[in-house]
Amino acid sequence: MDEAGRGACAGPLVIAACVPRPGDAARWEGLTDSKLLTAPARERFYELIVRRAVDWSVVIVPPPEVDGRGVHAANVAGMRRAVARLGQPPGYVLTDGFRVPGLGVPNLAVPKGDQAAACVAAASVLAKVTRDRIMVALDEEWPCYGFAEHKGYCTPAHERMLREHGPSPVHRFSFVNVSRRVSRAGAVRSVTGVGDNARVVGGSGTGAQAGAVDGVQAAVGQGVES
């Protein structure tokens, strides 16, 4: 299990869980932390993972929930939902870096898990590809921020756009660099595609694609289950 978007100041937090087939690690040669892969390699692994995995799920936590709970609490809650969404409870869960209480099954924190364990690396790819597609779609709704390039992370270019335009409804207002721009922007959360509740999607080795928040399904080519 792994997440994408934890440190971003805009866009959702995305958590994924993946149960590979026994022995499939050999088929995934080169699979590692999604941040270390090129975008084409991530897309290639994504298609392979959703086609081959025994089971998988993706949880999309929108910015209002991240703000309301806090990033870590939203991440932990999303991980619990991702495991609960799997068709059959796994015997144990490996997580990247920290243990997650309340999963209902034994779990082990693996330092640099997305580089050490195939199931964590696969979850990393599912989470990042899903989130990147969402951010590209949000870039079409809010082109002035450059979401397609920086994916909502706090880059110099993103900070410059925040200074010029103030925050959008898809920014995380609990982040200091966003909240200090609120008075200028008068931003409100009323954007299509970012709801008030997390979405959960997944598949069971059938090749079904993971989903995205309302309003961006067409851009990511996926369906949504709530």
Image: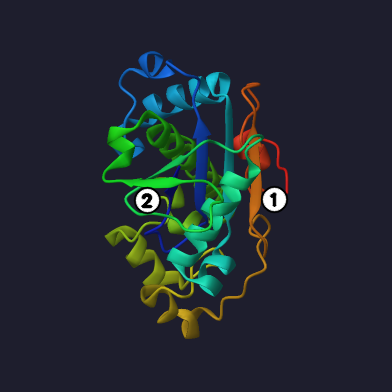
The reply to whether the C-beta atoms of the residues labelled 1 and 2 are less than 8 Å apart is no
Q: Quadrant of the N terminus?
A: top left
Q: Residue 28: x percent and y percent?
A: 38, 19
**Would you place residue 201 above or below residue 9 in this image?**
above
Q: Nearer the viewer, residue 17 or 30?
A: 17
Residue shown at the point (62%, 47%) measured from the top left: 84
- Name which quarter of the figure residue 26 lies in: top left
Is residue 216 in view from this perspective?
no
114 horizontally vs 64: left or right: left
* Number of residues whose C-alpha sits closer than 10 Å to that of mark 2, classed few (under 14), some (14–19) or many (20 or more): some
Identify the amino acid type marked 1: Asp
The dot on residue 214 is 1
Identify the amino acid type marked 2: His
The mark nearer the N terminus, 1 or 2, is 2
Q: Residue 185: x percent and y percent?
A: 51, 78
Mark 2: secondary structure:
helix
Residue shown at the point (67%, 61%) measured from the top left: 197
The dot on residue 150 is 2
Is residue 202 in view from this perspective?
yes
**Would you place residue 72 above or below residue 60 in this image?**
below
Q: Residue 116: x percent and y percent?
A: 28, 34
